[in-house]
Image: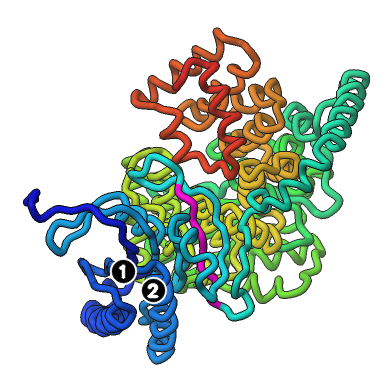
Amino acid sequence: MNIRNVKRKLAALVSADVVGYSRLMANDEMATIQTLTAYRELMSSCIEQYGGRVVDSPGDNLLAEFVSVVDAIECAADIQKKLKSRNQELPETRRMVFRIGVNLGDVIQDGDSLFGDGVNIAARMEGLAEAGGICISGTAYDHVKNKSHFGYEFLGKQKVKNVSDPVRAYRVLTRPEDAGALKYKRKRDDPKHRRRVRLVTIAIVVTVIVAMAVWKHQMDKKGRKPPVVRLLEKRGSLKLPDKPSIAVLPFTNMSGNIEQDYFSDGMTEDLITDLSQISGLFVISRNSVFTYKGKAVKVEQVAKDLGVQYVLEGSVRRVGDQVRITAQLIDSKTGHHVWAERYDRDIKDIFALQDEVTGKIVEALAVKLVGDEHARLSRKSTDNLGAYDLALRGSAHFRRHTKESNELAREMFEQAIQLDPNYMKAHTGLVWTRLMAWIYGWSHDPELLEDALELGKKAVSLDKWSSQGHVILGNVYLWKKQHEEAIAEFERAVSLNPNDSDALSSLGGALAFSGQPEKALGYLEKAIRLNPNYPEYYIFNLGQAFFQLKMYEDAVTALRKSIIKNPNFMPAHYVLAASYGHLGKQEFARAQAEEVKRMIPDFSIKASSEILPFKDDDDFEHFAQGLRKAGLN
């Protein structure tokens, strides 16, 4: 940098970037480059028209400078309007959509190039913008709020990369009816709302104190605990549901080759998935029934442990292109067979065979299909046996929960997608591998969640009636801290499949992290009832909800169970340390803190804030206080 050519100045900066550029390039490189070139020419012409200049345009990005921030925002709006019109001429899969960010800030000019926080914040605003939208910084808003015909929505103070202090962000509203309006994405940011809240705070506090005192008195008097805690402690004496209830035990692999376990497991999982879509049935989840795999069990005991009346058991023998399946449905009350059958089929008929077995069970239990359940049961997400086989293998690898097995699963799912690009199960599996790599810290690639989001949307588009697609997309939204979108996806999954315990648990977890822990408990109770041998993350979600309710003893109970199930489940160690910290149990708190530091030597509270999906700053600060009391920083 030549010092003589360097100067500081105040500039209005526009940063633009293509949404889903990698996907467009992967589909058709030449068409994407042609569209990008044409759109750059359009944008450059607009920028010149509004008195600005293009500073740089690497890859799919563009940076422009204006003397006036009013001109910068007017230009950005004009560009989005013209690009939208141009996109109408293209097929939907080839449309190129931009995000645009605007900032007014101090920059360093070296020749024609610009550097500094002013440029960085413009780029961060662009990252916060919606596809086809515009997001501006607080400094830009302060200069245009009374000088433009647009409206604005305050998005709150945003923590952005490489900027020490949070930055105010505003979404530009270009509809004529929004002109001059100032809206708030979060009610608590609205000054009028804050005044109303202050007026009723004292009354609410008094009411809550009285209610909690009464509740505690009743609990102490009757020795009662929240229903979900009682459910954790009442294993072996579960009440039967008010509709036919069934557990599908893992089908035994009779092929004489342990490497064929994935196929018999896949048959079991597919039957559970199909049956769970029927609203007239109560179906125990996969995780609970697979605890009995390879064990000699009595049907009556299984039914008692899981709280069901009917148990389905069977076997699979696969030899070459032939498969033999036996299945029998047993009434645990009488010990009698309700239905039994043996099938010898060609492997290519496996999907029709699954449909037939499901139909026989529904018929035997006299369950009436309602609404579109019959049509949904007849849907199969692939007819490609090779893709189906690869997806089953991928699922088997994924459930080992190691970095190496996760990578093997990713390869299997990608190969399945190559064979059948529209195979929804392979797409959801691939998203899970991305998400686990992020949550467990196996990869810190900033594009990982964006890639997972695009794949999750693709999975849902392939089969909008599958709860599994909505569950994985909801989880991606949650870890991206887009809480409203996450909750909406989980609610959709539960509505499609009331027996999907993963959807119920995920919804409970999202509500807890969104500041609604009381509401979370009901969904978590349902999830645990459907999955009595629940996985570690179910009771982690429960522990998180109790922690936010400041019911620290109950949080400790749940979180310790989570760690027993999976000692390497890192989030449970964080929250357990914070719970002990708030309880003042220093010996236990510091022991957990040491465990956290053993697992993550460079652990910091600040770094955890970037990963754990808390919605509200106050909730995270409550968590951080507990960690500090445990000796973490």
Say which of 219 and 110 sits in front: 110
Instruction: Pick whichever of labels 1 and 2 is earlier in the sequence.
Output: 1
Q: Point out the image quarter for the C terminus.
A: top left
Q: x, y (%) of residue 323?
A: 47, 62
Residue type at tag 1: Phe
Residue type at tag 2: Asp
Q: Can residue 297 be seen in this view?
A: no
Q: Does the magenta stretch include residue 182?
A: no
Specify the quadrant of the image occupied by residue 420: bottom left
> Looking at the image, is 524 positioned above or below residue 633?
below
Query: Residue beneath label 2, please?
Result: 71
Q: In percent of the image, x 70 and y 74: which residue is there? A: 374
Structural distance between the alpha carbons of marks 1 and 2: 7 Å
Say which of 30 and 504 sits in front: 30
Q: Dot 1 lies on which element?
A: strand
Q: Are marks 1 and 2 in contact (CB under 8 Å)?
A: yes
Q: In this view, does 593 lie to the left or right of 297?
A: left
Residue density around tag 1, few if under 14, some if 14–19, many if 20 or more, within 10 Å = many
Q: Residue 66 carries which label?
A: 1
Say which of 65 and 623 sits in front: 65
Q: Is residue 606 left or right of residue 482?
A: left
Q: x, y (%) of residue 462?
A: 50, 72
Residue segment shown in magenta: 167-174
Q: x, y (%) of residue 352?
A: 56, 72
Name the chief secondary structure element in magenta. Answer: strand
> Looking at the image, is 212 positioned above or below residue 584?
below
